[in-house]
Amino acid sequence: MKKNITIAIDGPAAAGKSTVAKAIAKKFNFLYIDTGAMYRAYTYYVLKKGINPKNEAESIKLISEINIVLLNDGRVLVNEEDVTKAIREINVSSFVSYIASYKDVRLALVSLQRKMAENTSVIMDGRDIGTYVLPNADVKIFMIASKEERAKRRYLENIDKHISCTYEDILFDVQERDRIDSSRAFCPLKAAEDSIQVDTSSMSIQEVVDYVSKIIIEKTHIKL
Ligand code: DC
């Protein structure tokens, strides 16, 4: 039987992980799992319920009533509501790192992520995929870029999606999230020891996709 392949892509906010992971998923016919979207969906629901996301005890009470679904076409559902666009808004972005720091939320979402990766080849992006979610991944990439470049890319992406924002707000958000994501106690943003670092600051998306594809082929001997 053919072995399923698992690819972990980690790195700080807006380093290009999801764009690259989506393109690779399409190229190799892997399932793409956007774990950040799951933490964002949880945050959206906390805000919708009128709960302060900085309140851990209140926020984790929702674990049993929240059902997050990632559809194959990229849509994200929370209790059947389509939140695909809403989870990219700046209010969700600015609170998501608090929600992602709660151990109980992480354990619930990690269990879902591992289940999704059980019987198929996957490329999963996030912060703790190589270190915690899929420690035996065949390939681990840690993607970085300068904070200015990351903020510029995310700003242009939002404008393209008609999500209102300013470059300054995005730069602040990206730095704040990196600070909180890297300093949390449980599963912080960190490169796995056996990961390959890719600095995308001066690379085009296509260059990164080609580079990472080459690594995947070398490491897994997969045929296109
Ligand atoms: O990848 P993203 O920007 O959509 O992720 C949103 C937030 O979720 C990010 O600030 C940190 C958190 N996150 C996490 O803690 N662990 C993951 N595996 C994925 C995301």
Image: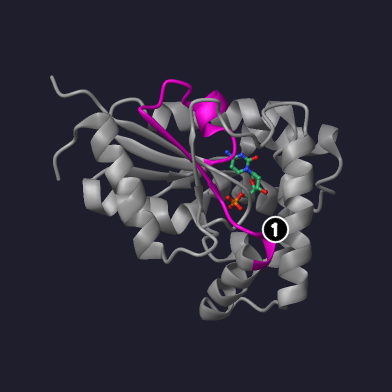
Q: Nearer the viewer, residue 123 or 11?
A: 11
Task: Answer yes or no: is residue 185 visible.
Answer: yes
The region drawn magenta spans: 126-148
Q: Is residue 69 above or below residue 191?
A: below
Q: Is residue 25 left or right of residue 161?
A: left
Query: Is the residue marked 1 within 8 Å of ligand 1, measured from its CB?
Result: yes
Name the residue: 35% across, 55% down: 209
- The amino acid at mark 1 is Ser
> For the C terminus, which image quadrant?
top left
How far from the left and from the top, in percent, is residue 105? 67, 32
Residue 141 point in image, percent of width and height: 46, 39
Which quadrant does ligand 1 occupy?
A: top right
Q: Secondary structure at mark 1?
A: helix
User: Where does residue 142 sit, x and y in percent of width and height?
Assistant: 52, 41
- x, y percent for residue 90: 71, 66
Quick check: 211 above or below 110? below
Q: Is residue 58 left or right of residue 212?
A: right
Residue position marked by numbered label 1 in the rendering: 93
Asked if residue 120 lies left or right of residue 76, the reply is: left
Say which residue appears at 60% left-offset and 50% top-offset. Answer: 41
